[in-house]
Image: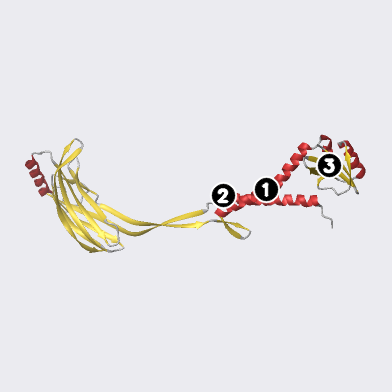
Amino acid sequence: MKVDKRKAFLVGIAFSISLAVVFGMYSSLAYSRAPITTHATYSTLYVEEGHFKHSGFFSNETVYKNGTSLEYYPSKITEELLGNYTFTSSPGTMGSYEATLHVKYYVSSGKKKVYILNESSSLGRGTFAGSFTLPVEFNMSALDARLKEVREGTGLYRAEREVYFVVKVRANGREPFTQEIRLNRDASGMLYFSGADKEYKKVVRNVSTTTNSVSFLGSDVGVSTARTVFPAMALLFAIPPAGFMYARRERKETEPKELKGLRKYTVEGTVPEGRRVELSSPRDLERVFELVDRPIIHYRDGETDVYAVADGETVYEYRAN
C-alpha cells in the first residue's frame, strides 16, 4: 500500500501543533497555581491573668460609705485604699510569686523627673498551685505624712511621689509574668489605679505546608515540576510547525511570480533517478505540467529551488535561482 508522504507529513504537523497547544494550556494552569500552600493555625498553650480589686475608706461618709469600690476616689477624704490582688493560670501549674510596694519621691526639672528618694517594702511572697490572692493596703494618711517629712527634710516643698506595686510570678515551664499597678493622682485631686488588669496568652503558631499538583493523564505532577516540564514540551512540539511555516515562507519569498498559479499543484519531496531535462522558464514548466498531468515536486539543491515534473524515467526540471 502506497503511503501519501505529504499527507502523512501534514498529519504529523497537525499532531505536533495539537500537543504544543495542550502543553501550553497545562503550562498556564501550572503558573496559575502556587507550588506550595501554607496553612497556619494558632493554639493557646496557657492563659495567665492578674486582677486588682479595691475599695476606699473615707474620713467623711456623707457621700461615699466605707468599703465602696470606685473608679476614682476623692483624695481629700480618702484615708485608706484596700484591695486584693488575684493571679490565676489556666491550666493550673505550680510556681512562686513576689510582690513589692515602691514609693519614689521626685522633683520636676523642666520635663525631667529628678528622683530624691526611693523606698520599697515587701507585700508578700510565696508559692502557689494554680492561683493565689494577695491583700494590698494603701494607707493614704501615712503616705501623705511621709511626703510631708520628705519635703521638710529636703527643703524641696514641691516634691511629689510615685506609688506603685509590682507582682512577679514564675510558673514552672512558663515565661515570667510581671504586672505593675500604679496609684495615680490627676490634676483635679482624684485618685485612680492604672494597670489593675492584665491578661497574657501564650499562643503557638503551627504551620503546615501542602505541595500542590496538576493532574495530567491520570497522574499528579507537582506544580514546580510542571512549571519546568510543560513549557519545555510545548516549545519542543512547537518547533516542527514553526520550522514548516518558516520554510513555506522562505519558499514563497523565493518562488518566481510565474509559478504562483501552480502553487496548489506543488508538493515537497524528492524526484526519482532518471534522465534530466532542464527547462529554461516557468512557462516551460507549466506546459510540461499540463501535458504530463503530474504534480510538481519542489526540493532544494544547495541554494537553488528546483521544481520538477517526473514522466516515467524522464525528469523535467526548472531551476528557479
Cα separation, mark 1 vs mark 3, equals 28 Å
Classify mark 2: residues with Cα within 10 Å, few (<14), some (14-19) or many (20+).
few
Label at residue 238: 1
Query: In the rendered image of this protein, does residue 313 appear above or below residue 207?
Result: above
Q: In this view, does 20 lie to the left or right of 179?
A: right
Cα separation, mark 1 vs mark 2, equals 19 Å
Occupied quadrant, residue 291: top right
> Sequence order check: which comes first, mark 1 or mark 2?
2
Occupied quadrant, residue 283: top right
Q: In this view, does 76 lie to the left or right of 9?
A: left
Whether tag 1 and tag 3 are in contact, CB under 8 A, the answer is no
Tell me the mark number nearer the camera, choosing from 3 and 2: 3
Q: Is residue 133 left or right of residue 304?
A: left
**Residue 137: x, y in percent?**
15, 54
Residue to which mark 3 is pinned: 307
Is residue 25 among what the camera can see?
no
